[in-house]
Image: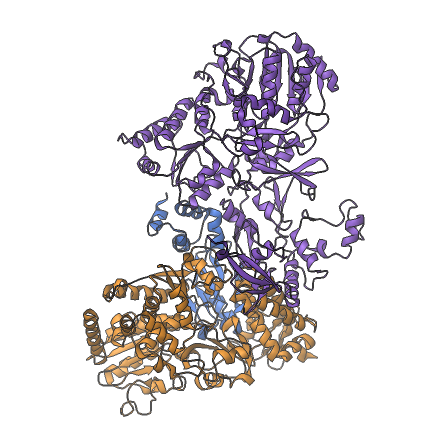
Chain colours: A blue, B purple, C orange
Amino acid sequence: MNHDYSGIFSNYAGLEGDLIPILQQVQLKFGYISTQSTKEISKFLKISENQIYGVASFYSQFRFTKPGRHSIKICMGTACHVKGGQILSEAIERELDVIAGESTKDGRFDFHRVACLGCCALAPVVQINDDIYSQMTVIKLQEILGKYE
Amino acid sequence: MNPQNNKLNITIDNKLYAVKKGSTILNAAQENNIYIPTLCAHKDLTPYGGCRMCIVEVEGARNFLTACTTPVEEGMIIRTHTDQIQKERKEILELVLSEHTSSCLICDEKEACRNSMTTIRKAGVTTGCRYCPNDDKCELEEVVSWLKIDEINHPVFYRGIQVEKNDPFYDRDYNLCIYCGRCVRMCQEVRMANVLAFTQRGRFTVIGPAFGRTHVEAGCEFCGACVEVCPTGSLAEKYNKWDGVAEGEILSTCGLCGVGCQIRIQVKSGKVIGVLPAEDKLVNNGQLCVKGRFSVNELVNHYQRLKKPQKTVGKAILDINWDEAIEIAADKLKDCPPDEFAMIVSPNCTNEDLYIAQKFVRSVMSSNNIDTTARLYYDSGLNDYLNLMKKSSALSDMKNSSAILCLGIDLRYGRSVVGVEIRKALTREAKLITINPNEHSLSLNADYWLKPNPGEVTDYLKTLLKLLNNESQGIKDENLNAISQILKNSENPILIVGSEFLNYPESPEIFQQINQIADKIGAGILSLPAQNNLYGSLLMGAYPELVAGGTANKNPSSTENNTWNTYKISSGKRLKVAYIVGETEPTSKKIADFVIYQNIYPVEQKELVDLSLPAAAFTETDGTFINGEGRIQFVNKAIEPPGVSLPDWKIICKIAQKMGAKDFDFSNVAEIQKEISQNSPRFKNLDKLKRKPQPLPEGITLQANQKQDPRDKKTTASYNLYKKEHVYRGIPLTDKVEGLKKLIAEE
Amino acid sequence: MNNFEQIKKKALDKWDSLIHSDIPVIYLGAASCGKAAGANKVLEIIIETLDEHKLKAKIIQVGCIGPCYLEPLMDIVVPGQPRISYANVDEIKTKRIIESYLLKNDPLLKFAVGHFGGEDKQLTNGLPKFFDLPMLKPQVRIVLRNCGYIDPEDIDHYIANDGYEGIKKALEIGPENVINEVKESGIRGRGGAGFPTYKKWEICRNAPGDEKYLICNADEGDPGAFMNRSLIEGDPHAILEGMLISAFALGATHGYIYIRAEYPLAISRLKKAISQMNDYGFLGDNIMNSGFNFHITIKEGAGAFVCGEETALIASIEGKRGMPRSRPPFPAIAGLHGKPTIINNTETLGTMPNIIRNGANWYKQYGTQESHGTKTFSLVGKVRRTGLIEVPMGMSLRQIIFDIGGGTQKPFKAVQTGGPSGGCLSEEFLDIPVDYQSLASAGSIMGSGGLIIMDEDTCVVDVARYFLDFAQKESCGKCTPCRVGTRHMVEILESITKGEASPNVLTKLQTLGETVKRGSLCGLGQTAPNPVLTTLRYFRSEYLAHIKEQHCPATVCRDLLEYRILPDKCTGCQRCVNVCPTGAITGPRSETHNLDASKCIKCRACYEICRFDAIAGDAIVIRSKRSDS
């Protein structure tokens, strides 16, 4: 077995209930859930890959494509919506030619719309990697994106 | 126990009922013939509560409750179709229909279209506008007409999902799917194959394997259980997609392997349009494998079927009538000396066919030269394999087994119903050990999967035996220690033997070791031969060494080394007449001066036979099979054989009678069974005993071929074909059944 | 219990040395929201400034005290002086305050918002007490009592403030009495449905079987709600102690905390707290030498709103798709792995130590006759003072929005209670008391406590569409009414916001909403139509304006708006020409620019640049198309 995986698996007893925590660890390590990942998890938990994929694709946390070098998350919470989150989201899609949930062709960014980031008082909010940008506007966005290569 | 304690009193629609404790409202209603509409509920599946059609009013409950999920309680007062419920159901069903291309359900011209095949639209006269393969068997349609919906007040969302047609046997049109989840639950709960899963969520939910793989890639067994439970036309069998509803169904036994699944043959207009599993608690439990479920109709309806007797004149093949054919056959056979005659008969034939065949050889031809191709299939391991059958246990014994050891078997396609039983046993905490060099359908489920290289199997088994005997001995695989412990401490262990090891030169040793392991731990063996009626062919005496009843042939020539058998077809003495019943031509050279060929398909190389006689397939005849467990099972005629074809026994009897033989004037199989019962008492009162499996009697032994040096081409047997596992009457299923070609690669 | 007394004594000493510290203590609000507002940068500056001047001070990172609009918040205590709170500190302010206060003993009160001391201190003259601030004064802080006050990462701080006294008492009085006390207190589930907590506990306690589970539901999925996050970040031990009490009462041996993975700080604080509990023998086998065993596992949610529903949450912990199942059987009888399971909301559990420690009668003094105690809310949207609050049950919406929240900038229009599952209430409901019954009778729900305030710039049709779209996207897809019904509703609402709907759609929307509400399997579907049904009831005229006049009164619905350049204001600075992504704006420098409406995608870029960067500042307007005619 791939060493990367056995390291993760060694923390778990191999019960069905370990599936989601394992998927989370795998995604943390590799950035996404690959076919190789489901295969290894399948062997470890004795659950079919189909079932694993069924569970993983239910939850919006899991991704099945390689992430970009930078990850953009735009908050779609209520406060952000009221303050123009949708317009920002469209601006990102237009600027980067990317669809929510996918990565740009050059692999520079991946873009996700997420439920509330919990900074409602600072809406609208965009998160790039670990940086949170508050009270965003379309103009500010254009400047900020340039910072990430 | 007082049965009263198990009952609860409830009121449904103002009537009092005493119902079983623990049942759901739906069960209780159904048991008392009260209709509650359902789309997602299914008797074999756990309640789901998704379609919301079965909502009922329960006094005291805040909301309507789903009947399929709510357990009954003492004193419950239930109303099943108040105006409000009906209105609610209608509204919900309209929502279902708005996701379902449903014009066939609510079209104004519906009735006119059905009755007179006319429609104001530009649709084909023969098809009407009824483009859904599930027409007339649609459960959605039933509920729609029950609720009298003729209009949908919502726009229809067509999902625009591409119809999935790349897998064999069934098409999947998820545009028709109503997300009842029956197929998923079937695949997960009952088959435990876990190929189908809900993926994504909400309105983007898709049913299917991981990463959009095809079913072939995802490990699907193609058992078709999902197709059967689909209430809509989403899942439709390719072959009979437009055949509509069957006119009737006939209960019978599948003839495609030694499991002997009970089947319901679906018949329409004198044709087999499909096969569905029968509810049978002892053998297949309402399940089938891909062969039984999907290949029978294609196999027996094939356009290439042999439909008339034919004779070869020079290079020409001429159709002839039965009288002429019988006359030619009788004529040639009459002059044939016993030792220059031989009959090859198929272990796929019914007991009645086999009995008549051997009776013909022995009493009419005064010969011993009758054999089946099983001898070639099992080769040097033949007799050791039969010894395994002498320890056979019943499939249902697996219910009590705490350890299962699978040896060289892949249950993905053939015999997949056994795989289901194994997985069921695993949910009861039984341990599973598989020994197989290749990836197989149970590799994921197995507690231990040993992968010996070819040549190492005997070493593994030897070590295991030593460990079981408490002799510590150089362990080849550390898991063997644990395995031996599991086996030692197990209750009612079962060994399941497949065909993987048959091709190994050391197969006799392997089978002997398996036998010893079984003795050591007191295990039953499930050998489940590839030939559906191998047991019957032995019991009927279709071998030189055996006579009817399965006892040893006292005729001295039968034990001599120079006895004729199928090994000698090409190397032995030149035959004058060969009579092949239910097999294909054995070699590329003609095997006798005159060859009579009797089968359901014509011979491929016409010049190798002189006379072809059209026979009936197992769907077209009555009789019995004996499966691998040793259970006598009924075969019932579902349809007339094509053309003028006849059951094997009838043809043989005709020839025998033509040759002046007496005692061949049987008019039905019951008469033959009566005669069989003189030698095999089990055939008396067949009705009572039919369900009881019996291991192969001790006395049945055959002389296996000596181990051969593979380099010695001269002695290699003919019929190399017969190493193939999925064969019916000599015909590889992959030749005739389109879909199997994609699944099973047999050289 | 000897052991506990020793631990407590040590903790009290530690706390005392902090309160009476001989060097200054700096408290920094470092919850997620504080960090988003720049608390990390402030922390760096604090350390730098202290280093620069070789000053000695203790720095303590505390949780959120509530008023998010004041973040980042920094408090300073100089020995002998009360704790002074500074709001909205940035890099420059921080440095100035520290230098001024610690070097020159001038607390720079112009930057301060409040103090935590007594009234008579000279130094704080003129400065109000922090808890006398209008946002805080009407509040009653029971579950939030420690938030922003103690170091959440130090168990001793919690113990010194009566922590773990509740479980200690529970162990003494026994499980039946605990349940009785909870029954007496009248507390109802704070997660939304408001089921009496004791009833659930009783069912579970009486269910047969030795193996029982307790689950703390911290899967706070409502957009616009962050009570649980703040509570866990600010006082994790309160929840954990609540779990101990609950588990002891139920006879549960294993507990799970199901928490959103999007809350990394809360998760790490919980982990730290659990390990401290283990060190003190408050968790594991034989807790406090009582023979009571309890273990806790943290499960991170993977992003599915529906997992807030009990049965879906259980499925998720079991490693399955989070699809709800029908009840009965209820989880209290057959839940996780088929065993009796209680799922309590974070806030319910966080309240437990207070109820047990102080008794039911104490708790009952707060709230109304039917709804006892307090409830936390996250106050967000178009309200002046946003943040986390805790008020006694029965306080009116008006008090909450106007007294605590400071009202709205523009005229108030509506308040959404209960997040996407709740209803949108108009001004006429401002005086109803906030309790389970009153909200329900108005067609809304208490929910977990999100309060979203809207003013006249908010379009209620757009908000209803937003919530429905949220519910639709989060629907698990299992049952038809929720999966398909919400989709039809979203489509209809979209057509309304585009001005393409016919007048009869409102009846259809109503019928659909009721079908979804009655017919759905779980709480998500059963409450999803609430925002639509309530807005239809209370804001019908706004729907009709969209439908009949193609007019969005709040100028929000994009298809009903247009961007215009006011010729008399435009200076022709070309800033907007440069940012327009579609070339809709043209015009030479210094001449009035022209906006081609057919090319305009209403991306807002020109509007923003004109307001913030351009010379004119207000030459581009967004207005209702109708105003044209």
Please, is residue B490 above or below residue B732 in the view? below
Comparing A72 with C617, the one in front is A72
Query: Can the viewer see residue C136 in this picture?
Result: yes
x and y, in percent, of residue A11 in the image: 33, 52
Comparing B278 with B505, the one in front is B278
Query: Can the viewer see residue B574 in this picture?
Result: no
x and y, in percent, of residue C550 in the image: 67, 75
Q: Residue at x 36, y 39 (%)?
A: B490
> What residue occupies the far front of the structure in this picture?
B2
Please, is residue C564 above or below residue B699 in the view? below
C15 on left or right of C324: left
Comparing B584 with C27, the one in front is B584
B381 on left or right of B652: left
x and y, in percent, of residue C392 in the image: 41, 82
Please, is residue B290 above or below residue C505 in the view? above
Where residue B148 sits, quadrant-wise, is: bottom right
Image mark count: 0
x and y, in percent, of residue B206 in the image: 56, 53
